[in-house]
Amino acid sequence: MESDQPVAPASRLPDGLEPYSRTASFTEETLPAGLRKDHTTKAGSWGLIRVEQGVLRYRVTDQRRLPAERDLTPETGPAVVEPTILHHVEPIGPVRFHVEFLREPAAPVPLRQQEKLPKQENGERPRH
């Protein structure tokens, strides 16, 4: 039986995730307004907020998690952003940071199915 009680936010990534995207570096002046207010990543998409310079406050505000606030610096290491969990950031003075996005690796298509794909896409029936 699952509990409806909030749990602590993740403090580390699950094993086996692969990076697939990275934002440009943001500063307190270039930080998009959407990141300053509550937002989420999509299902299956994890994030790492890496502060390059200064201090960035990271808040988890999702009702499924215990409230959490952390001041990130280059020395603290990155913050883990869980998929679909509400959060926002706030610069504390001058700051520069970026976000890396990670996800589960795509399942490889078995070789036999790869051979069939072009034929199926062209409307041909695969031979058995």
Image (tube, rainbow, N blue to C red):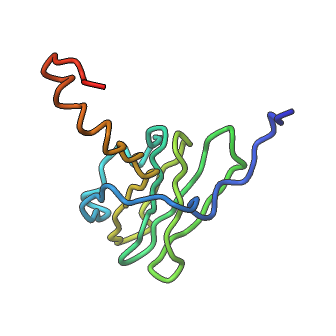
Position of the N terminus, as image quadrant, is: top right
Q: Is residue 74 left or right of residue 20?
A: right
- Which is nearer the eye, 126 or 121? 126
* Residue at the limit of the structure toward the right, as seen here: 1
* Residue 108 drawn at (x, y percent): 37, 47
Please name the residue shown 51% across and 71% down the image.
72
| Residue 17 against residue 7 in the figure, above or below | below
* Residue 100 drawn at (x, y percent): 37, 61
Q: Is residue 45 left or right of residue 14?
A: left
Please name the residue shown 41% across and 69% down the image.
50
Q: Quadrant of residue 56?
A: bottom left
Please name the residue shown 17% across and 26% down the image.
119
* Residue 113 drawn at (x, y percent): 32, 36
- Which is nearer the eye, 106 or 60? 106
- Which is nearer the eye, 9 or 89? 9
Please name the residue shown 56% across and 61% down the image.
13
- Which is nearer the eye, 118 or 31? 118
Q: Quadrant of residue 34?
A: top left
Position of the C terminus, as image quadrant, is: top left
Q: Is residue 110 left or right of residue 86?
A: left
Image label count: 0
* Residue 70 drawn at (x, y percent): 59, 65
| Residue 98 against residue 81 in the figure, above or below | below
| Residue 43 against residue 76 in the figure, above or below | above
* Residue at the limit of the structure toward the front, as seen here: 128
| Residue 123 against residue 101 in the figure, above or below | above
